[in-house]
Amino acid sequence: MEIIELETLELPELRPYATLRGNLFDKDGSFVADSPRVVGQLLGSGLEFKSLLCTPEYLEKERERIEAAGVPKVYLGSRELLERIVGHSIHHNVMAHLKRPTNVPLEELPDRVVMLTRLNNLENVGAIARSAAALGVGGYVVPSSGPHPYGRRAIRVSTGHVTRLKVHCYEDILQTMERLRELGYTLLAAEATPEAVPLARFGPVPKRWALILGNEEEGVPEEVLEKCDAVLQIEMEPGIKSFNVATAGAIIMYRLRIER
């Protein structure tokens, strides 16, 4: 492990830490995470680190875990220096630059997966990942053109638990749904429609299922609903149209979990 005490901010290797636009990381398949809680989760994830940026105090406290994780380079600086590098105020003492996991083929996904279509909010993507990990839903199927689960805000909201999920990025949702059906998955969508099944009445829960969650405002597209085996609706009080998509996803995943 190489330890570099920072004397200049001009090192090219530090540029990812100042990058907030997730699409810039798509080119090299990497991501940046911050905060001791998230980085602590990543240190035990088995993912490949490119570098760590932290204070001397953090290195002293976590050195054994950092070495065990195989971190090749550690850049050391004060919190004030870290703030100058990232370009804004921070409330933590560590950031990490890692390689994203490889795209998992559909054939290698577990029996329970959650699938996203047209979500725009990275925080929702992260919150859904955290709920999925907590509820034993081991697969995450997301559009390649949308917010990535390893985006900085998404992984922060997931508190690093997205690393527990096998992630597949798809190009065409209808083709992906058809392939999942061929693999034995029952396709379920969360949406309020006249034909939707009240969640409390749905059953029996199939062994293999994919839960599809849609856009925060527009929901699941009609062409996707038409290809689903069932549409599930959470019962709620009159006058309330819907839950936040991350909340709805957590409720449905829990319901499917306790009935398995």
Image (cartoon, helix red, strand yellow):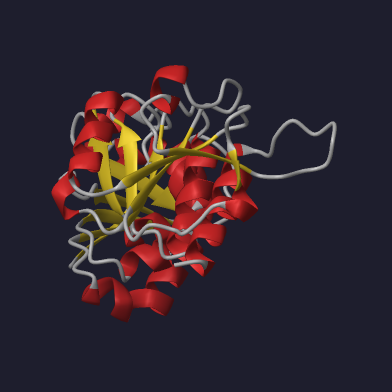
Looking at the picture, does residue 103 appear above or below residue 93? above
Residue closest to the eye, 36 or 56: 36
Looking at the picture, does residue 251 appear above or below residue 177? below
Counting the numbered discs, the total is: 0
Image side of residue 97 versus residue 56, left or right: left
On the question of residue 56 being in view, the answer is no
Q: Quadrant of residue 28?
A: top left
Residue at 39% over, 33% down: 228
Residue at 32% over, 53% down: 139
Residue at 39% over, 55% down: 162
Looking at the picture, does residue 33 appear above or below residue 72? above
Residue 67: x and y in percent read: 23, 74
Specify the farthest residue to the bottom. 64
Residue closest to the eye, 79 or 108: 108
Residue at 58% over, 35% down: 196
Residue closest to the eye, 180 or 202: 202
Residue 35: x and y in percent read: 49, 57
Residue closest to the eye, 44 or 87: 44
Residue 1: x and y in percent read: 17, 68
The C terminus lies in quadrant: bottom left
Image side of residue 199 versus residue 110, left or right: right
Residue 107: x and y in percent read: 14, 49
On the question of residue 27 being in view, the answer is yes
